Image (cartoon, rainbow, N blue to C red):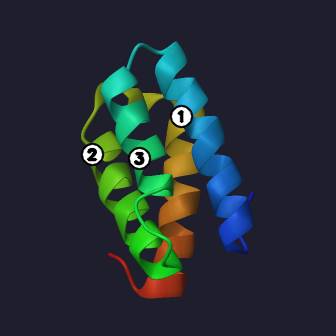
Amino acid sequence: MPIKDNETLYSSVRELCGILSGLGADELAISLRGALVASSLPGEVLGEIGLSLKRIRGHEAYGRVDVRRRVDDAFDYLRKTIGMA
């Protein structure tokens, strides 16, 4: 499902944190949760989320369809919103 606004992104990220924790990838989940509260400035939060998502792409959990879909959808949104590659 395409992400259309920050609230949808945050919700998807929270779901992804739960999935990662369930897979035993607690370090990734903690990093992603931390990104959600990194700043009161939305642009900084989006940037931190993007950095955390890049770490997930390098992890074996990214091979799971449910993880990959959420990560890729989030990156699509971040590319459109803040130009993150």
Q: Is residue 1 above or below residue 58?
A: below
The CA distance from mark 1 to mark 3 is 10 Å
> Which label lies toward us, 1 or 3?
3
The CA distance from mark 2 to mark 1 is 13 Å
Residue 70: x percent and y percent?
58, 48
Residue 62: x percent and y percent?
40, 35
Assign a secondary structure to mark 2. helix
* Quadrant where the N terminus is found in the figure: bottom right
Residue 26: x percent and y percent?
38, 22
Assign a secondary structure to mark 1. helix
Assign a secondary structure to mark 3. helix
- Residue on which disc 1 sits: 17
Residue 45's quadrant in the figure? bottom left
Residue 43: x percent and y percent?
45, 80
The answer to whether residue 54 of the structure is visible from this angle is: yes
- Residue on which disc 3 sits: 34
Q: Nearer the viewer, residue 13 or 56?
A: 13
The structure residue drawn at horizontal position 50% and vertical position 42%, both measured from the top left corner, is 68
> Which label lies toward us, 2 or 1?
1
Q: Amino acid at mark 2?
A: Arg
> Are dots 3 and 2 in contact, CB under 8 Å?
no
**Disc with the residue nearer the chain's start (1 vs 3):** 1
> Are dots 1 and 3 in contact, CB under 8 Å?
no
**Pointer 1 local density, CA inside 10 Å: few below 14, some 14–19, many at least 20:** many
The structure residue drawn at horizontal position 71% and vertical position 74%, both measured from the top left corner, is 5
Q: Which mark is residue 55?
A: 2
The CA distance from mark 3 to mark 2 is 13 Å
Q: Amino acid at mark 1?
A: Cys
**Disc with the residue nearer the chain's start (3 vs 2):** 3
